[in-house]
């Protein structure tokens, strides 16, 4: 059997938890909005840089007149001969113990 003061205490706890959940949800939504805004700003900044690079400017804004350098071609190395795998030794057989009678 429950008394009225216990029911009131439980009801009060439920109200407090509901208020806490609503506050946490609001904080989470605010945090997500800030992160989305920061991400959008970064994407806009990157898009500007990419547009400059495609137009023939480097990341600092100065025009690039140099032709791209060719990549050095690595020479193939002679194939390394693999050593034959070491032979495995036959397992040593244990001597059977003599039973005492």
Image: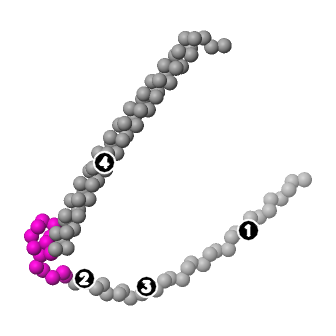
For label 2, the crowd category at 10 Å Cα-Cα, with few meaning under 14, some 14 to 19 and many 20 or more, is few
Q: In what element is the residue under mark 1?
A: loop
Which comes sooner in the sequence, label 2 or label 1? 2
Left or right of 43 in this view: 14: right
Residue drawn 53% across the image and 15% down it = 8
Which comes sooner in the sequence, label 3 or label 4? 4
Q: Main secondary structure of the magenta part?
A: loop
Q: Does the segment drawn in magenta span residue 11? A: no
State the separation of the CA atoms marked 4 and 2: 40 Å
Residue 80, label in figure? 3
The answer to which image quadrant residue 99 occupies is: bottom right
Badge 3 vs badge 4, beta-carbon distance below 8 Å = no
Residue drawn 47% across the image and 24% down it = 15
Look at discs 3 and 2 and give the one toward the viewer: 2
Residue drawn 28% across the image and 53% down it = 39
- Residue to which mark 1 is pinned: 93
Which comes sooner in the sequence, label 3 or label 2? 2
State the separation of the CA atoms marked 1 and 3: 38 Å
- Residue to which mark 2 is pinned: 71
State the separation of the CA atoms marked 3 and 2: 26 Å
Left or right of 80 in this view: 59: left
Residue nearest the observer in this picture, 22 or 70: 22
Which comes sooner in the sequence, label 4 or label 2? 4
User: Residue 1 at x, y = what percent?
Assistant: 66, 13
Q: In what element is the residue under mark 4?
A: helix
């Amino acid at each position: 059997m429950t008394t009225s003061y216990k029911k009131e205490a439980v009801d009060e706890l439920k109200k407090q938890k509901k208020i806490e959940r609503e506050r946490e949800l609001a904080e989470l939504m605010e945090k997500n909005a800030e992160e989305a805004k920061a991400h959008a700003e970064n994407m806009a900044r990157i898009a500007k840089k990419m547009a400059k690079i495609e137009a023939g400017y480097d990341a600092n804004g100065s025009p690039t007149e140099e032709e791209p350098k060719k990549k050095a071609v690595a020479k193939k190395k002679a194939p390394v001969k693999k050593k034959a795998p070491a032979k495995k030794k036959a397992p040593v057989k244990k001597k059977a113990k003599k039973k005492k009678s």
